[in-house]
Image: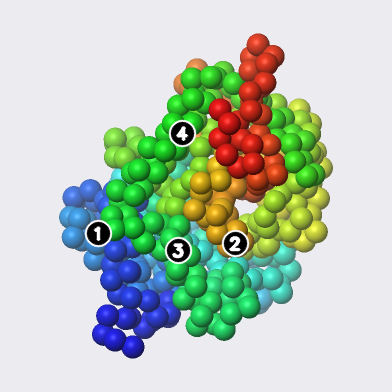
Amino acid sequence: MDASTQTSPSGAVRAETITRYADLLVRLGANVQPGQIVEVAGTPAHAPLVRAAADAAYRAGARYVDARYFDPQVRRARIVHAPAAEALEFVPAWERERVLALGEERCARVVLTPLLPPGLFDDLDAGLVAREPLPSLPESLQIVMAETTNWTAAPAPEPLWATRVHPDLPADEALARLWEDVEHVCRLDEPDPEQAWRTRFAQLAEPTGRLNEARFDALHFRGPGTDLTVGLFPTSRWTSGRATTVAGIEHSPNLPTEELFTAPDPSRADGVVTSTRPLVLKSGARVDGLVVRFEGGRAVDVQADAGLDALRALLGRDEGATRLGEVALVDGDSRVGALDTVFWSTLLDENAASHLALGHAYPRTVGEGERQRANRSEIHVDFMIGGDDVEVTALARDGSSVPVLRGGAWAL
């Protein structure tokens, strides 16, 4: 191993790769501004990338960088030894206050995922796993929806995750392969990753603009196990790639990002939809074989081969948890989808295929006049429903229909 290779809990990866990745996350992702407080969040296994991101943030002029480590093994110990299920719901007030303070101080944030490696909680009671809320507190969703922080979430390979994604490989080879995957989907294999992303943003802007010009009334998804119509607001606003904070700072909330998304009308979803990829909830619980039936916008029947109790616990949080807050389209040019790999990470899997989200809608995807009608909830759960064999058709307000996605390609 030469001096340009760094060995760490994240595995053997070239230091140059970590540095380039950190620069991309800080500059294009969170777009850290001079004088900002910056949070870099990850697990102990992510330490090399956390440190590189902190270094990049200070080079960008950050006033202070808070390296925030969340240990999933400590969370597991809490679940295993909890004296009662109710005890798992306790969260110290300062944890919630800290998250809200990030928004109040207009901080920048870099979040490395997954904070909960897939598979770590599979042998535990799914209901108990779902009751332990950390690290995804409702306050985190609040500051995202309020757009008070410029932030990005990005994948950070680590051993437990790698062996789940590539189980047929020895552990060290699995980790190396996952790093290759992440380098590719994050465009680090391009001479200028930042410019490569700006080119992709421009590509995504074309169908985004066409959808916004058309102002369709609804979308119809049809494929194996799926026949679902999702209504849209007259002012549903499609967006992709970039977002802007209330302070006017442009950033990329997700890297990679391959989706076009908007807020549907939460009172208009009818039919049945079958998930095309497994879902790992923010609690770490795994949901397989998900099938949801909607009537009048509400999920009236939810079935799954595994993880159903954990999902139903989330759907019981509030009225909005059973209604849709997002509909997203992903085309076949997605680098994530082209790998044909299940990553067991919503951040990556949702950028491989079209998807829906139960729960809170992004306010910026609805016109101000109808924003109060957009769905509200403590949760936002994305699940994948798309694929090359799932057709997406738009229904116009005059009753006509327009093909949108066919065989994974834009048909607009």
Mark yes or no: residue 289 visible.
yes
Cα–Cα span, label 1 and label 4: 27 Å
Residue at 54% x, 73% y: name it: 162
Residue on which the image places disc 4? 239
Q: Label 1: which residue?
A: 57
Residue depth check, mark 3 versus mark 4: number of the one nearer the observer: 3
Q: Earlier in the sequence, mark 3 or mark 1?
A: 1
Q: Which residue is mark 3?
A: 182
Residue type, label 3: Val
Of the 4 image quadrants, the one containing the N terminus is: bottom left
Sooner in the amino-acid sequence: mark 2 or mark 3: 3
Observer-side mark, 4 or 2, equals 2
Rendered location of residue 389, percent (x, y): 70, 44
Residue at image position (59%, 69%) is 165
Give yes or no for contact between labels 1 and 2 (Cβ–Cβ under 8 Å).
Answer: no
Looking at marks 1 and 2 on the same chain, the residue that comes earlier in the sequence is marked by 1
